[in-house]
């Protein structure tokens, strides 16, 4: 399984039915998506999958092979925050 995560090609070795949330946090050590309700209701795990907001806890890896994933870490550069990051920083 291969994904582009925050602009970098990444190979994943988790089973195909593993949630994207679990793979991001446990295999790739990307911790911005959070495990809240694990039912897709709270939005704490939201990431962009091919530019579309998705609840990572509900997305099995098998459904997104080859996709582009963007997490909060991928939204801006260290020297320039994205509008979303700036809003979090301000509040």
Image (cartoon, helix red, strand yellow):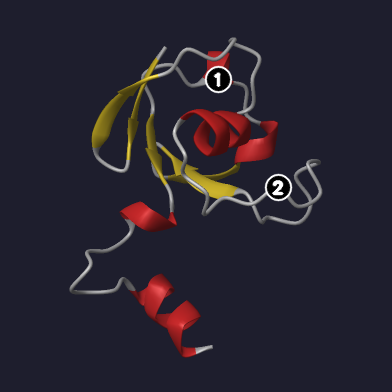
The extreme bottom residue here reads 90
Say if 24 sits above or below 11 in the image.
below
Residue named by callout 1: 61
Q: Position of residue 62 (x, y in %)?
A: 55, 13
Residue contact at pointers 2 and 1, CB within 8 angstroms:
no
Disc ID at residue 69: none
Where residue 8 sits, quadrant-wise, is top left
* Residue 17 or residue 28, whichever sits in front: 28
Q: Residue at x 36, y 76 (%)?
A: 83
> In which quadrant is the N terminus drawn?
top left
In this rendering, the label closer to the viewer, 2 or 1:
2
Q: Residue at x 59, y 10 (%)?
A: 15
Residue named by callout 2: 35
Q: Position of residue 21 (x, y in %)?
A: 60, 36
Q: Residue at x 32, y 25 (%)?
A: 10
Secondary structure of the residue carrying numbered label 2: loop
- Count of numbered marks: 2
Where residue 60 sits, quadrant-wise, is top right
> In which quadrant is the C terminus drawn?
bottom right
> Would you call the spot at circle 1 few (<14 residues within 10 Å), some (14-19), or many (20 or more)?
many
* Residue 39 or residue 8, whichever sits in front: 8
Say if 32 sits above or below 23 in the image.
below
Q: Residue at x 66, y 56 (%)?
A: 44
Direction from residue 36 to residue 78 in the image, left or right? left
> Would you call the spot at circle 2 few (<14 residues within 10 Å), some (14-19), or many (20 or more)?
some
Q: CA distance from mark 2 to mark 1?
A: 16 Å
Direction from residue 42 to residue 91 in the image, left or right? left
Q: Position of residue 23 (x, y in %)?
A: 55, 28
Secondary structure of the residue carrying numbered label 1: helix
Say if 58 sits above or below 78 in the image.
above
Chain-order first, disc 2 or disc 1: 2
């Amino acid at each position: 399984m291969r994904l582009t995560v925050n602009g970098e090609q990444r190979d994943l070795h988790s089973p195909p039915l593993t949630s994207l949330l679990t793979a991001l946090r446990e295999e790739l050590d990307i911790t911005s998506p959070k495990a809240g309700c694990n039912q897709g209701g709270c939005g704490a795990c939201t990431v962009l999958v091919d530019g579309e907001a998705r609840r990572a806890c509900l997305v099995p890896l098998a459904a997104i092979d080859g996709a582009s994933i963007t997490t909060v870490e991928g939204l801006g550069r260290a020297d320039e925050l994205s509008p979303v990051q700036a809003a979090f920083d301000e509040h």
